Image: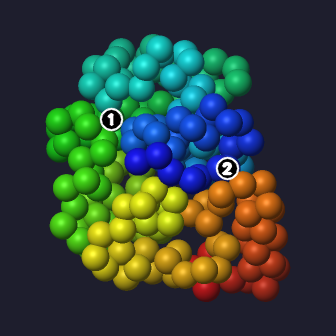
Amino acid sequence: MPGTLAVTGDADADALINSDPLALLIGMLLDQQVPMEWAFRGPATLLERLGSLDAVAIAEMEPDLLDIECRTKPAVHRYPSSMAKRIQALCQHIVDNYDGDASLLWGSATSGADLKQRLVSLPGYGDEKAMIFTAILAKRMGVAPAGWQDAAGPFSDNTPRSVADIDGPEALATVREWKKAQKAVGKSKQQ
């Protein structure tokens, strides 16, 4: 992996999500109801507090302790307790299905459709989040299984509509402007 995703405004946080598959999955998990920068900075905050991002260790962690680490200011999310549960469930899923190695989720996918199905099965990931993550992998990480464009849907195009299209501050501003314009005319990210 290292990828080209540059969304947090912090070089170390961006380096983490571009090089650590679990960090990238957690960042995408957190990407709801908070600014993108905050969501994708969350894995770096957790790394600093936990000492490592290890799916097995997080899955086995006492839930109350993970909750404290997520709630400590600055919190990893607007709803830190809820996200602590989701992070732990995500890590448990990675342990149960991919031997604790998040990269196997896409590394062993046989097609874009297979990848999307694997993503949709993750706790906290729905259809749109799975499409966006598929686009992130293809556009920013060089992981583009056959059929990824169909699996990513509208997020596979060149319209700057999601985090998958962000490789720096200018791209972040462009995506924000596009989303604002879509919202003003009552359209979603997928239109």
Seen in the image, is 177 located left or right of residue 93?
Answer: right
How far from the left and from the top, in percent, is residue 161?
65, 72
Asked if residue 133 shows in the view, the reply is no
Name the residue at 26% across, 59% down.
Answer: 118
28 over 140 or under it: above or below: above
Report the front residue among 53 and 62. 53
Name the residue at 42% across, 26% down.
Answer: 53
Report the front residue among 159 and 190. 159
Q: Earlier in the sequence, mark 1 or mark 2?
A: 2
Q: How is the image coloured?
A: rainbow
Within-10-Å neighbours for mark 2: few <14, some 14–19, many 20+: many
Q: Secondary structure at mark 1?
A: helix
The amino acid sitting under disc 2 is Val
Name the residue at 63% across, 31% down.
Answer: 12
Q: Which residue is mark 2?
A: 7
Name the residue at 23% across, 71% down.
Answer: 111
Q: Which residue is mark 1?
A: 91
